[in-house]
Amino acid sequence: MLEITFSDSETLRESARFADAYARVSAARRAKADRLRAEGPRRLSLAAGLLLADTLSGLGVAGAMAEDAEDENGKPYLPRCPELHFSLSHSGTRAMCALADRPVGCDIQAVTPRSLRIAERFFTAAEQERIFSQATEDARLDMFYRIWTLKESFVKCLGLGLELPLDSFTVYPEEDGAIVLIQDADPGGFRLFAPEGPEGYRCAVCIRE
């Protein structure tokens, strides 16, 4: 089982919608939103929590949302439904949720112009070659975001946080759409894919096989 959903945090600009979202997310999510001073990040945080609440409600386990927690590495989990696993991500004005019956990680990023020197610092040689071999600047930027989101989704699936350096494993999108993962952080099998997300965004999901 795997459920992937997206939302636009701009819908929470209306005070009534914001209040409804605030009431429906977990206490931990409300506390996280309260720590954010800017309205945009607060809406994003609540939008991500609301996606999880709506997905759980659709599965008939809305009560699981009353409490969520994080383990020692910061990976979130549901104490009341340990058989379910989830991952949240947000960027720009969009939020993303992945809910599964196995460990899962997701990531979404707004595609905006940026220096690709960051790839030289944090990506492997094979990933850098994949990016800089693209014919145009737009294609190089798109490949950068494809690889970045895939790498982040894998890290979040493992739940190792900053303990797993981004250049310690390789994610290689093939021309035919297949995604190669080369890693020795975990002996298990993983499936990575890039679902179609909102326009102007790249997103990725990693789920344990």
Image (spheres, rainbow, N blue to C red):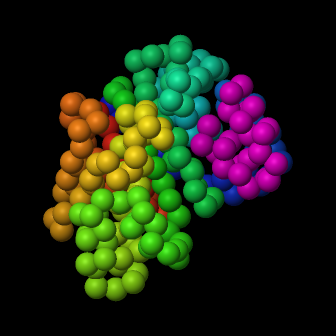
Q: Is residue 166 left or right of residue 23?
A: left
What residue appears at the point 58 percent right and 56 percent down from the top-left corner? 91
Query: Looking at the magenta stretch, what is its main secondary structure?
Result: helix
Residue 65 image offset from top left, x and y in percent: 60, 24
Residue 205 image offset from top left, x and y in percent: 37, 46
Question: In the image, is residue 13 above or below residue 79?
Answer: below
* Residue 45 shown in magenta: yes
Q: Residue furthest front?
A: 121
Quarter of the C terminus within the rendering: top left
Quarter of the N terminus within the rendering: top left
Q: Is residue 112 left or right of residue 173?
A: right
Q: Residue furthest bottom?
A: 136
The answer to whether one can see residue 189 in this image is yes
Q: Residue furthest top?
A: 80
* Residue 60 shown in magenta: no
Report the front residue among 49 and 159.
Answer: 159
Report the front residue among 32 and 11.
Answer: 32
Q: Which residues are magenta?
A: 27-49
Report the front residue among 91 and 95.
Answer: 91
